[in-house]
Image (cartoon, grey):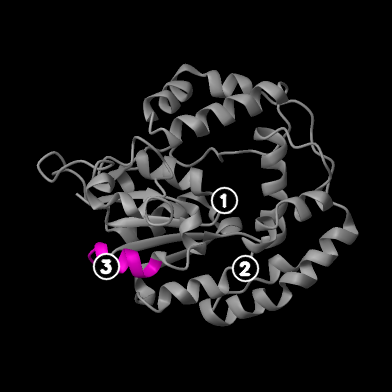
Amino acid sequence: MLPTFLGIGVPKAGTTWLYDLMAAHPNVYVSAKLKEVHYFDRHFAKGSEWYEGFFPSQRDSPQYAALGEVTPQYLYCQACPQRIAAQLDHPQFILILRNPVKRAWSDYVFKLRIANYRNTFENFLVDFPSALRYGFYLQNIENYLRFFDRDQLLILISEKVFADIKLARKQLAQFLNIDPALFPETAGMKKANQGYVPRFRTLSAFSTRTLELAVRKEQYWLVNLAKRSGLKRLLSLQGSQVQPMRAETRKKLQDIYAQEITGLEALLQVDLSHWRV
């Protein structure tokens, strides 16, 4: 079978949390081999049969009301909406948006943690221009709306999600037409990917590169083994805290995203004033 819903973004806004939450519901199936399948952006040439291999057959999935996967880069892929429209029958999309300044900072801390990056945030923005680009949501959302109806997109605000997890679970359940009462009581209560520098930075970065290579070679069993064994958690033990963002850098980024935030408020009819402080 092919998925009925896709988590399409954004990076560092709660997509790992979304994946783990959906996996906890008995009537939802998320791609167990891999969280981020990247079919519609990186692996489209492999064909739908390859993609179907991440999901159970119809015969094996009578209990599932929704099947999906979470690849946060799908939002930024210009070709993805048309590809998805051609292959999936009336799909649903879940999109979590985060204050773009905090999203960029979280991206930086993530690189410190898993890639052994050792330069300043200001240098990071130059070395990884996608960190800024990923904070521009409006044009990419509009690209999806060219192919899909607005009611096919559930757009959540990260800060509101983590301020009221139970409400977020209800919103997701209503959107996917599943019973919110079947979520385990603790599902989603632990926020994933907290920002810090790991105690064993070099080993942590090496393990990340090794697992990325395993994914490229489609050795998904190795990725899941690292998770189940606790090795990934051990190498990510918390070490030092990261120094806060400079005030002048924050102000510069707020100015860069000011027009973007205003446009999002108009399109989504939401108040994003808390992103301006």
The residue that disc 3 covers is 86
Tell us which disc is closer to us: 3 or 2.
3
Q: Main secondary structure of the magenta part?
A: helix
| Horizontal side of residue 186 vs 90, given as left or right | right
Q: Residues within 10 Å of mark 2 (few under 14, many from 20)?
A: some
Q: Residues within 10 Å of mark 1 (few under 14, many from 20)?
A: some
Tell us which disc is closer to us: 1 or 2.
2
The residue that disc 1 covers is 162
Q: Position of residue 95 (x, y in %)?
A: 47, 61
Tell me how far mark 3 sits from mark 2, CA to CA. 26 Å
Between 73 and 42, the one nearer to me in the picture: 42
| Horizontal side of residue 236 vs 184, given as left or right | right
| Horizontal side of residue 75 vs 194, given as left or right | left
Between 164 and 41, the one nearer to me in the picture: 41
- Badge 1 amino acid: Phe
Q: Position of residue 64 (x, y in %)?
A: 21, 46
Mark 1 or mark 2: whose residue is earlier in sequence:
2
Q: Secondary structure at mark 1?
A: helix
Magenta stretch in the rendered image: 81-89
Mark 3 or mark 2: whose residue is earlier in sequence:
3
Instruction: Check contact, mark 1 vs mark 2: CB within 8 A.
Output: no
Which labelled disc corresponds to residue 136?
Answer: 2
Residue 83 belongs to magenta span? yes
Q: Say if 111 sits above or below 9 in the image.
A: above
Where's the C terminus, which quadrant? bottom right
- Badge 3 amino acid: Ala
